């Protein structure tokens, strides 16, 4: 599980400035419910000073905390000062974010930029109307210019870094080659071509998020249907590196042979389809 600072927990449990500003001078909307994270930021400007800022967000604890922190950072700043706020500043204000959750601070920075541009009449509030680049990640709707910017501003080195900061590559994985190409482009070099080798196991080379999606897919598509045929089911509770925690429900929860099912079916299938080092425990 991810470790959160006390400040992240505080802004998640007691978020500041939640709501809307009806006569907002600028509105920035980024993300989408279909992609799992969405943020709308409202700013009210008095002269050249941001007098008020509010937000509405749909997302995880880090998304809520990042949005809350951003609104606190904005109040009292001039527009020029606000324009200098980066995703790193948001994360530092919170005492740090897990690397896998840095995309939440990036979303805050994008919403702020969008709100300021909207205030100036340059773009509509919705981010999707301003993209001119190429769509790279269809799963999360991430464009090449967003990825290149994240790589350069945060000195990203790997595909997993890109996924952590933008979510690109965290779904089906079809865009991984494009992400590698963009990493090379950002460094001003071509993508190094190495002889292809067969992976030692299906999960080799996948990012943490891709690995989790693969585990979920195997459980949903191959393991759960077999259990349901016998009146049982399974709930995925947690994934911690190579340990998978599950809970039996239905007939499986009272079955005297549940431990055999746990190891001979569930663990064996995940070892075969994901990683031979996986262990499965019942929670």
Image: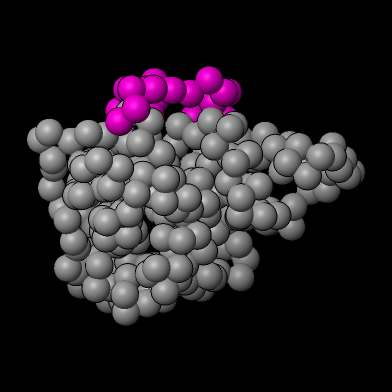
- Of residues 196 and 153, the one nearer the viewer is 153
Quadrant including the C terminus: bottom left
Q: Position of residue 157 (x, y in %)?
A: 70, 54
Q: Is residue 69 above or below residue 176?
A: below
Quadrant including the N terminus: bottom left
Q: Residue furthest left?
A: 22
The stretch drawn in magenta includes residue 126: yes
Q: Is residue 231 left or right of residue 91?
A: left
Q: Is residue 151 left or right of residue 77?
A: right
Residue at 32% x, 66% y: name it. Answer: 237
- Of residues 269 and 18, the one nearer the viewer is 18
The stretch drawn in magenta includes residue 196: no
Indicate how the structure is coloured in the image. Answer: one colour
Q: Is residue 38 left or right of residue 182?
A: left
Q: Position of residue 123 (x, y in %)?
A: 37, 22
- The region drawn magenta spans 119-139
Q: Position of residue 75 (x, y in %)?
A: 26, 55
Residue at 53% x, 20% y: name it. Answer: 132
Work out whether residue 84 can be spotted.
yes
Work out whether residue 210 can be spotted.
no
């Amino acid at each position: 599980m991810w470790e959160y600072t006390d400040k992240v927990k505080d802004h998640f449990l007691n978020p500041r400035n939640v709501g809307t500003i009806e006569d907002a001078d600028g509105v920035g909307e980024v993300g989408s419910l279909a992609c799992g994270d969405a943020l709308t930021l409202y700013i009210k400007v008095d002269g050249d000073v941001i007098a008020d800022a509010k937000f509405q967000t749909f997302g995880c604890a880090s998304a809520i905390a990042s949005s809350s922190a951003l609104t606190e950072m904005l109040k009292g700043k001039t527009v020029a000062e606000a324009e200098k706020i980066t995703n790193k500043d948001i994360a530092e204000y919170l005492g740090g974010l897990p690397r896998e959750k840095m995309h939440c601070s990036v979303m805050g920075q994008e919403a702020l930029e969008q709100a300021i541009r909207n205030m100036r009449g340059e773009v509509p509030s919705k981010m999707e109307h301003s993209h001119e680049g190429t769509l790279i990640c269809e799963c999360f709707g991430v464009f090449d210019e967003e990825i290149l910017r994240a790589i350069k501003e945060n000195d990203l080195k790997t595909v997993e870094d890109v996924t952590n900061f933008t979510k690109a590559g965290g779904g089906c994985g079809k865009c991984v080659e494009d992400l590698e190409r963009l990493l090379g482009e950002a460094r001003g070099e071509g993508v190094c071509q190495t002889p292809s080798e067969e992976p030692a196991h299906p999960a080799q080379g996948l990012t943490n998020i891709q690995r989790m999606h693969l585990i979920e897919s195997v459980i949903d598509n191959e393991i759960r249907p077999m259990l349901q045929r016998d009146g049982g089911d399974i709930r995925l509770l947690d994934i911690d590196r190579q340990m998978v925690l599950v809970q039996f429900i239905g007939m499986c929860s009272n079955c005297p042979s549940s431990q055999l099912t746990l190891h001979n079916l569930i663990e064996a299938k995940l070892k075969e389809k994901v990683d031979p080092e996986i262990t499965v425990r019942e929670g």
